[in-house]
Image (cartoon, coloured by chain):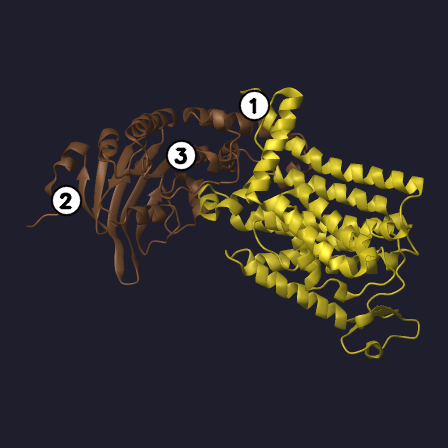
Chain colours: A yellow, B brown
Amino acid sequence: MKTAGIKSIQKATKDNLIAFGIVIVFYIVVQVMSACGVLTSSFSGQLIPVCAYAIMAVSLNLTVGILGELSLGHAGFMSVGAFTGVLVFTNLTPALPSAAAMVLALAAGALAAGVCGLLIGIPVLRLSGDYLAIVTLAFGEIIKNLLNAMYLGVDAAGLHVSFKDAGSMNLASDGKVLINGALGITGIKKESTFTLGIVLLIITLAVILNLIHSRSGRAIMAIRDNEIAAESIGIDLTKYKLMAFITSAVFAGVAGVLYALNYSTLVATKFNYNTSIQILVFVVLGGIGNISGSIVAAAVLTVLPEMLRVMKDYRMLIYSIALIVMMIFNQSPAMISWRKRFVSKVKSNHSGKTGGKEVG
Amino acid sequence: MALLEISGLGISFGGLNAVSDFNLVIDQGHLYGLIGPNGAGKTTIFNMLTGVYKPIYGKIILDGEEITGKNPEFINKAGIARTFQNIRLFDNMTVLDNVKAGLHNRIRYGMLTGVLRIPPYSVREKEMNEEALSILKIFDLEEKKDLKASQLPYGQQRKLEIARALATNPKLLLLDEPAAGMNPNETEELMKTVRNVRDKFGIAILLIEHDMKFVMGICEKITVLDYGKIIAEGDPASVRHNPKVITAYLGGNE
């Protein structure tokens, strides 16, 4: 009996190892390609966005796949994280070494996004139904328009905010404009690196996978499967819904900081409704509730459109075919049973042992 | 002192009095039946007892603590666990995880312990696995622990629901039609299991059931409900021969 308990812990660990394996193999392959000089500049330019989008997809999967709530404004949390992180970073860099400033920027971005998650979650997650989808959709748009219209500056007297134009801030002559309305933040020092992206992705995976395979994760999945039953066994619905949603928002904030510090300019319109939907597409195509799938989908669907640029007019055609193929491979019952047969065949060839697949 | 005391309980939906002036006393370790024709208000009483509905009249006292109108989470922590007429399992979780979810408030560790995997994690998880397996064993489900709950046949799903409810360590267990959809052999087996659970855990059980062989064979006392009102109460033999009960079930002209 004791071994049975240990076995189920090991199984969870095996699921985790697959996700980490994908990330580490990807990192090694890229490093080898880069050492051999076969890495094209368009591909290497995609590496940090790939990491950022993978973090976004994994964190959104916690809300959509594990908690079972639809969020249509994940890019809003990314945006909050990005602006907060960049402001912290640019104001700290002369004084602090850039590594320390980076850590503080990431923490600030995560905190700001987490607070937004809390503010949205407290009223909305008390309700059951699709309210979260509606409110997060609105949140994403509000954040985008707010940051797009905002002028922020600093001088000896402190911070100045205006929603009219830069002049209305009445900055002193030594003042500095931090956010210049629709032009956003310019002159950012590009400090994100691919290694940092991979490290952050691994941290995200470790936190979210460990959360899923814990007491709290079981409570979250119980709520997803049946709210009434979850309540009947004494699970605090609001607490665990908030836990999942805020964790999801925090990592979206981290992804935002990583993403923003990869470009010299940051504008609010980058984090629009399309971005939120794009991340949802990664989650759905990778498999709802399937964390490794989210990483693969995010990587493939971020890199593919860039690689297809050589195809010119056929680019979007091939991209949409790729979407359909992934959808069939992941969701069609015939494909799922074929994959199961294939996996059990491989397993029986190896050790003569077969096993069912656990949802992760 | 009685474990559960219900007095003057009532609720109405719109103008309809679904349940009125319902009284019930259950002692520690008792097996109690609640029967009545369809629509008599039996499940409504369960829903009031577990906080799904808030009663309009009356009082529910569990082990000296008033729980009237509290929320389901509070009531479960106070000591009432239940199963549902239409099975409500965590379908995409394994059989073992369904029971471990039931252990949520009994074996605890925080979010950070789980995320950082610091020592209490493996100790508590091991405790949980052992406890969950010992509960599954009572229901002959330990072999199925790694299956998804939705992959179990119907009869075993009903059993898993009871196992999950038991995992919360209740003082009172409410079973809503535990034998529904079971064949005679399964029903017989379930009767043994329910008796066994009562003896082993020393808890009180209140059950709704339409299978009269089951109810008469297992319950020490029965309350009969019709149109939201108690029409008879007593031991199985006296209830069986009560003319009011026969009329309620079979119909009749005065």
Determine the secondary structure under disc 2.
Answer: helix
Which chain does the numbered disc 2 sit on? B
Q: Which residue was labeled with disc 1?
A: A4
Quadrant including the C terminus of chain A: top right
Distance from the alpha carbon under mark 2 to that under mark 3? 31 Å
Give the residue type at disc 1.
Ala
Q: Which residue was labeled with disc 3?
A: B162
Q: Is residue B141 above or below residue A266?
A: above
Determine the secondary structure under disc 3.
Answer: helix
Sequence order check: which comes first, mark 2 or mark 3?
A: 3
Q: Which residue was labeled with disc 2?
A: B250
- For the residues labelled 3 and 1, say whether their Cβ atoms are less than 8 Å apart: no
Q: Nearer the viewer, mark 3 or mark 1?
A: 1
Distance from the alpha carbon under mark 2 to that under mark 1? 51 Å
Looking at the image, residue A224 sits to the left or right of residue A261; the answer is left
Q: Residue B219: x and y, percent?
A: 25, 32
